[in-house]
Image (cartoon, coloured by chain):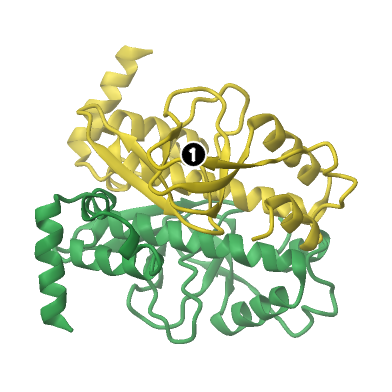
Chain colours: A green, B yellow
Amino acid sequence: MKSILKKLITNGILSPHEISSIQIKETKINKGTILQRAGEPGGRAFYVKEGLVRAYTIDEKGKEHIFMFASEGWMVSDFEWRENAPALLFVDCIEDSLLEIIEQNDIIKLNRLFETKQVPNQINQLMNRIRVLQKRIILLMSADTLTRYEDFIETYPDIVQRVPQRMIASYLGVTPEALSKIKSKMLKKH
Amino acid sequence: MKSILKKLITNGILSPHEISSIQIKETKINKGTILQRAGEPGGRAFYVKEGLVRAYTIDEKGKEHIFMFASEGWMVSDFEWRENAPALLFVDCIEDSLLEIIEQNDIIKLNRLFETKQVPNQINQLMNRIRVLQKRIILLMSADTLTRYEDFIETYPDIVQRVPQRMIASYLGVTPEALSKIKSKMLKKH
């Protein structure tokens, strides 16, 4: 299976010269190894060449919620690539695996390369949409209403004032009364 | 605000000649108008130039669950663009809006153009990932476990046999016992 960097070259997204400063090595990882813990800084990306990986969250009660599985050819990342942003997901290996692990500094380098070009910049925009959708799923699975409301405000800063409260409640999956309680809780918090 | 087709040209994704057969007109839509109903064939895409649109599902009990809001510059679509595939989402206008409505035949034409080129083909792959994530959210919000299990099998046909049942249950957000019941239900159904 082709490496992720070779794919970027073959697909005409970046030139061999442009990615010459980026080194991504294959790594063999044993079944059961935890690759990333939610809350730790430095989100990375995991490209599966062989084996099987899962990404999951653990809620306040200690319950696991599996966000996704990734087998050959899939990539796992929470797309939280701003410097020092905490990882959203735990990632571990369900089978012995051969992975390409893309460290945060290399992801940042790749994104900067993308931003300089029109078409790859379009790809950046789509990846941002994927980030937003992934976060919605992760929060739907395991976060409390307050956290989901804060994420709503972050995702839709310009819309909050234009939408009736009952629709925001419907977006969050709670009653308008529960939303009203959450909002007073938030006012006290800040 | 630029039209969606002009954006594709400015971003260097397609040439003016290539998209000459595609006509997308601006349409004024009144507040409250329903643009699409879940279950009807012919999924479309809605690009918001002015106004505010929401996309939602209605569950078996008649309860609305809002999937997303879209204001200026956002696009709404359930990405169910195979011919005759039923739409997953209801879409309506929360404010008087100016929209570009991209009909299914034009979406299919655009996708064919994308497939002929390497970089846009990468964009197609990202859009497919967006489709899968969106469907996961929509089903998490409002579908029963059986529907979510069927979607799991469709998304991960090669993984179902490699993953322990308790992990599939954790992906679906149910107990292993509930999953076991769902599986016997499914066997009876087919």
Mark 1 crowd level (few <14, some 14–19, many ≥20, 10 Å Cα):
few
Q: B82 or A50: nearer the eye?
A: B82
Specify whether A130 is left or right of B15. Answer: left
In the displayed structure, would residue B58 be above or below residue B127?
A: above
Q: Which residue is mark 1?
A: B155
State the image coordinates of residue B173 (x, y, percent, origin top left): 25, 45
State the image coordinates of residue B42 (x, y, percent, origin top left): 57, 26
Q: B47 or A23: nearer the eye?
A: B47
Q: Residue furthest right?
A: B17
Specify whether B88 is left or right of A121. Answer: left
Give me the residue at 35% from left, 73% from top.
A37
Q: From where the camera sits, is residue B163 visible?
A: no
Quadrant housing residue B148: top left
Specify whether B27 is left or right of B97. Answer: right
Q: A157 or A47: nearer the eye?
A: A157
State the image coordinates of residue B112 (x, y, percent, origin top left): 77, 38
Give me the residue at 82% from left, 44% from top.
B19
State the image coordinates of residue B81 (x, y, percent, origin top left): 60, 33
In the displayed structure, would residue B179 be above or below residue A58?
A: above
Badge 1: chain ID: B
Give me the residue at 69% from left, 29% from top.
B105
Specify whether B9 is left or right of B40. Answer: right
In the displayed structure, would residue B104 be above or below residue B27?
A: above
Q: Amino acid at mark 1?
A: Thr
Helix, strand or loop at label 1? It is helix
Q: A174 or A109: nearer the eye?
A: A174
